[in-house]
Image (spheres, rainbow, N blue to C red):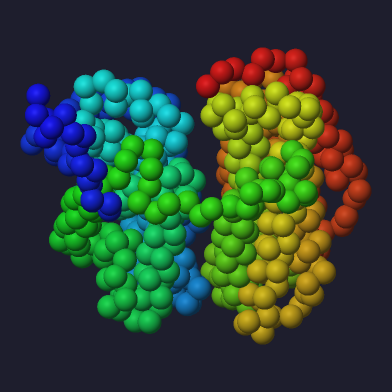
Amino acid sequence: MSRAETAPAAAPPRGRRTAVVPPEPRGRGVTGWTTLLRFALRRERVRIPVWTASVALLLAYVAVALDALYPTAAERQARAALVSSPAGIMLSGPQYGIEDYTLGAMIANEMALTVMVAVAIMSISLVVRHTRAEEETGRAELVRAGVVGRHAPGTAAFAAALVANAAIAVASGAVLSAAGLAPVDSFALGAAVGVTGLVFAAVATVTSQVTEHARAASGLALAVLGVAFLLRAFGDVQELHGSWVSWLSPVGWAQQIRAYVDLRWWPLALSLVLVALLLVLGAALAARRDLGAGLVPPRAGRPDAAGWLASPLALAWRQQRASVLAWGVAVGLTALACGTFVDSVGTMVADNPEIAAMLGDPTDLVSGFVAVMALFLGLGAGGFAVASVQRARGEETSGRLEPVLATGVGRVRWLGGQLVVTLLGMAALLVASALGLWLGALSVGEDTFGLADYLAASFAYLPAVAVVAGVGAAAFGGRPGLAGLAWALLAYSFVVTMFGGLLDLPSWAGAASPFWHVPQLPGADVEPWPFVWLTLLAAALVGLGLAAFRRRDVPRP
């Protein structure tokens, strides 16, 4: 054997790639996506029907309620004047049909935006859950060890989002048609909701390639949604029916179909083109990274953690601080917008006895309006409370709880830390709602009440919100599968407290809601007993959840 044959191979030049991974054959990148789609749909077999039913029932209820609240053209035009303020435009839409404010125009302007944002959040969560979250937990590596292409998980996740959004679109169109609205416009509005959801499903497909963590991927996608919302809001405020800024937002495209006024379909084509471009971008980015890695490497942390982090409470705060901030900003901005309507209460109820009845004493409409807004924002704080308590369930199912309990941390101490953060977050949201209402009222020259009055009206609902959180804690401690009871109680409370008088519900129906028993401040006589027994009930539910959690098994993920 010659010296050349026995000599070791020369090392490759430094900085050059030693091997080139050949691309997958055409069509092989999505191998196995149909199997993964069936698996994803099985995992979503509860979430998709619940989302579909929730959106459909919400639209059906709003259509019936608005028709009952504003039965005449004069009352609807009074409502149109109210939502034509800058704050109303930011929270509604481009004001198509405002000159002849029909029931359909009311729904398209005032409800479509809310539903679009909710469905967009659903789509983001669904895609991230089946892509980046699977890689973060390591399950995607096991799946990819089989005959599964690189792009199959992403394709299956987007296809599952397509199924979910199609179901919501069809159900929305069907219930609006059943409510007596024009069928073609109803299904067009449903299609606009579904296509908007697809846009943000595609956005989540891209953000899932950028970062290593599911939370960061969801946060980036939600930030894009926030920018789209603000662009639409600023554009619509600048000019009637929207300015050129409105056309920079996919949310604005969906609202530009002019449903129930002068229907046009072509703005939805812009959203479909954007979906195609984002999916191509997501596939290109996925081909440039390793499994489990992100294109943007995580920021290196300190070698040693701060001493104050060495407790379950600090860990819970670290995990939930972004959520508290996001909910606080959302509640605060909503309260600020609601506060700007304080000086318009008289115009609002002048020709509408139903709204006047909702606000209570006709001689003190401002107090009634502030009380109703405080109740509405308190229900929003209840939504945070339920989501925060259910975060503990996410720690358990992801497998992160077991290593914590393997240390010297006890179960009660760990869950107690989670619930303390929930309580602090609830209090922070109620402060944000009071500040927002106060600043909004001051911005329009209304100074009947001071900040202390708004704080009292908001904090009166803290015990009721704590009861809702206690229901979630008791369900988590004993039977985690019953966690939906807290959401059901919150939804029930919203209906009976906001619309119980209009629906002429019996008193026992209202008594089942903890919010029903809270005195509506300012203006109402304050009795201490509702606060006392609601606080005791919340404490008992939390204690029951802690005791049950000590005794049950922690399932493996």
Please say if 51 is above or below 348.
above
Q: Nearer the viewer, residue 239 or 197?
A: 197
Horizontally, residue 87 falls left or right of residue 139, namely right
Q: Nearer the viewer, residue 436 or 545?
A: 545
Q: Residue at x 70, y 15 (%)?
A: 552
Q: Position of residue 519 (x, y in %)?
A: 80, 52
To which quarter of the image does residue 5 belong? top left
Q: Is residue 500 visible?
A: no
Number of marks in the image? Answer: 0
Please say if 41 is above or below 122.
above
Horizontally, residue 166 falls left or right of residue 424, namely left
Q: Position of residue 342 (x, y in %)?
A: 64, 73
- Furthest toward the bottom, the residue is 445
Q: Which quadrant, please, contains the N terminus?
A: top left
Please say if 196 is above or below 398.
below
Q: Residue at x 47, y 51 (%)?
A: 298
Q: Residue at x 73, y 51 (%)?
A: 306
Q: Is residue 135 visible?
A: yes
To which quarter of the image does residue 145 belong? top left
Horizontally, residue 169 falls left or right of residue 322, namely left
Q: Position of residue 442 (x, y in %)?
A: 68, 80
Q: Residue at x 67, y 69 (%)?
A: 437
Q: Position of residue 503 (x, y in %)?
A: 58, 44
Horizontally, residue 556 falls left or right of residue 266, namely right
Please say if 38 is above or below 111.
above
